[in-house]
Image (spheres, helix red, strand yellow):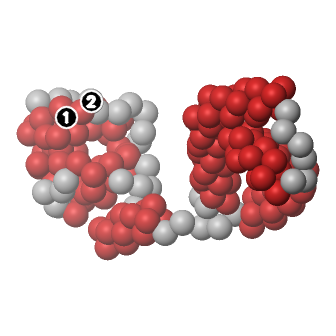
Amino acid sequence: MALGESLSKARKDKNLTQDMVAEQLYVTRQTVSRWEQNKTMPNIYVLKELSLLYGLSLEQLVSEKTDSSDEINSIESREEKMTRKKINWFALIGVLIFNILLILTVFTIVGGVLFCIWLLDIVFIASPLILAYANISGAQAYANDQTIYAIIFFVIGIVAFPIMIKITKLLVNFFVKYVKYNVKAVYN
């Protein structure tokens, strides 16, 4: 219902004429008539006076619903819609297909590279132990240059370890944010 219809209905419900309303608000009858015909709109202060005169809240007066129980139901349904999330099925199917392809390619490659780099870092850190075992077991003869290389690899592995932790955390955080983004896309 338009504002004019709402004003007219509220006035008639109170058994008031346009002249009576005009007298109460210090306006002309024609002004009240124009409000009720939706030719002009009363300002917010006049709407407040009209709501007091008709015994209605501002929301009831300007509401497009005709029945206050409809208005209450409308408010409840809006609150219910806001709390209850709906699944967007097209987004869900699209996200699933896209993510399957993405996981099969990018995440597999990135995960594989990350795994190999971690394995290499662990081998670098363990290189002095591997060299010592090879020398003690007799699998390899002792050589000074191999000892120097093992120490260099060990230092590289120790220096790279915190960097690898940061890279891994960065990738995990990216993955978590990516999953949250997809969840938001699926749920409205």
User: In whole angstroms, how far apart are the C-alphas of marks 2 and 1?
Assistant: 5 Å
When asked about the image quadrant of residue 165, the answer is top right
Q: Are marks 2 and 1 in contact (CB under 8 Å)?
A: yes
Q: Position of residue 162 (x, y in %)?
A: 58, 35
Identify the residue under disc 2: 43
Whether 27 is drawn above or below 136: the answer is above
> On the picture, is 171 further left or further right than 37?
right
Identify the residue under disc 1: 46
Check the picture and name the quadrant holding the N terminus: bottom left
Q: Is residue 116 visible?
A: yes
Please name the residue shown 85% across and 33% down the image.
Answer: 143
- Dot 1 falls on a residue whose secondary structure is helix
Please name the residue shown 34% across and 38% down the image.
Answer: 35
Please name the residue shown 87% across and 53% down the image.
Answer: 138
Q: Is residue 16 visible?
A: no
Whether 187 is drawn above or below 177: the answer is below
| 153 vs 136, nearest the viewer | 136
Please name the residue shown 11% across and 49% down the image.
Answer: 53
> On the picture, is 28 further left or further right than 86?
left
| 169 vs 50, nearest the viewer | 169
Whether 52 is drawn above or below 151: the answer is below
Q: Residues within 10 Å of mark 2 (few under 14, many from 20)?
A: few
| 83 vs 20, nearest the viewer | 83
- Amino acid of disc 1: Val
Check the picture and name the quadrant holding the C terminus: bottom right
Q: Residues within 10 Å of mark 1 (few under 14, many from 20)?
A: few
- Amino acid of disc 2: Asn
Q: Position of residue 120 (x, y in %)?
A: 79, 43
Give the total number of marks visible in the rendering.
2
